[in-house]
Image (cartoon, rainbow, N blue to C red):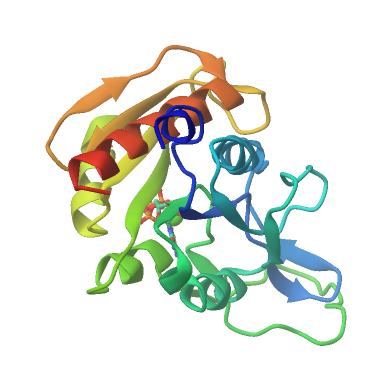
Amino acid sequence: DFFRGATKPLFGKTVLVTAGPTIEKIDPVRFLSNRSSGKMGFAIADEAAKMGAKVVLVTSVDNLKAPHGAEVVKAESAADMYEAVMGRYKEADIIIKSAAVADYTPVNVLDKKMKKQPGNIVLELKRTKDILKELGEKADKPFLVGFAAETDNLEKYALDKLERKRADMIVANDVSRQGAGFAGDTNIVTIFKRDGSKRELPLLSKHETAREILREICNEIEKDGG
Ligand code: CTP
Ligand code: CA
């Protein structure tokens, strides 16, 4: 009905959100990761729930509060996240991949702590699977939103990711800008869409940014006829 549509525009939709860094084990006490905090993804999950969506949150992060009623799926490594997302993508109407997924993971995970030796060592890494790219190749793909955290050439890289991953939307931020970094509570993003349009948002809280991103998604989905 009208009221529900106005205040709960995502009612009846399932939104799968990935958030935070991945953790790639080297040995039982060491890992490779990145500076993502998960705050942007958790803000998206929270705002999507407020807009009436059923939320599935796939994340390694356990120090942030997931929205009430969300299904939280713990995924530590890029491989864990791949399994979690691929196992659930069919349930989702919208997938928002705000997680910072490792591009490389150690070839060997030692089961005992590595002991230091004189001299340098080389850690051999292999490529991980690109989850968003694989989703983009599915015939029954949901509405796909990728993130791009860049330090230079923002537009060029964002448009390249939109194309290469066949996403419907890329949310890009220049993490070298003050107020747009990983750990803070604010962000400055530009939204790139399939039709070639872009929308630059000002410095906003991550929650306000999340609302704007979700509004854009709702508009796009409505255009496609729900
Ligand atoms: N992504 C993913 N699986 C990966 C790597 C990235 O699903 N193995 C997703 C991210 O969650 C994000 C989008 O792809 O939504 C863009 O991630 P990004 O790291 O910016 O893109 P890459 O293709 O890995 O390119 P690069 O790191 O070289 O900029
Ligand atoms: Ca990457």
Quadrant for residue 45, please give it.
top right
Observer-nearest of 158 and 1? 1
Whether residue 156 is situated above or below residue 6 in the rendered picture? below
Q: Position of residue 24 (x, y in %)?
A: 66, 68
Q: Where is residue 84 in the image (x, y as percent from the top left)?
A: 57, 73
Q: Where is residue 83 in the image (x, y as percent from the top left)?
A: 55, 78
Can residue 151 be seen in the rendering of this structure?
no
Whether residue 140 is situated above or below residue 153 in the rendered picture? below
- Name which residue lies at 13% across and 35% down: 196
In the image, taking residue 191 as reference, residue 60 lies left or right, namely: right
- Name which residue lies at 38% across and 34% down: 172
Quadrant for residue 60, please give it.
bottom right
In the image, taking residue 155 as reference, residue 145 lies left or right, namely: right
Can residue 49 be seen in the rendering of this structure?
yes
Q: Spot the residue most to the top.
A: 202
Q: Where is residue 177 in the image (x, y as percent from the top left)?
A: 49, 19
Q: Spot the residue most to the front.
A: 1
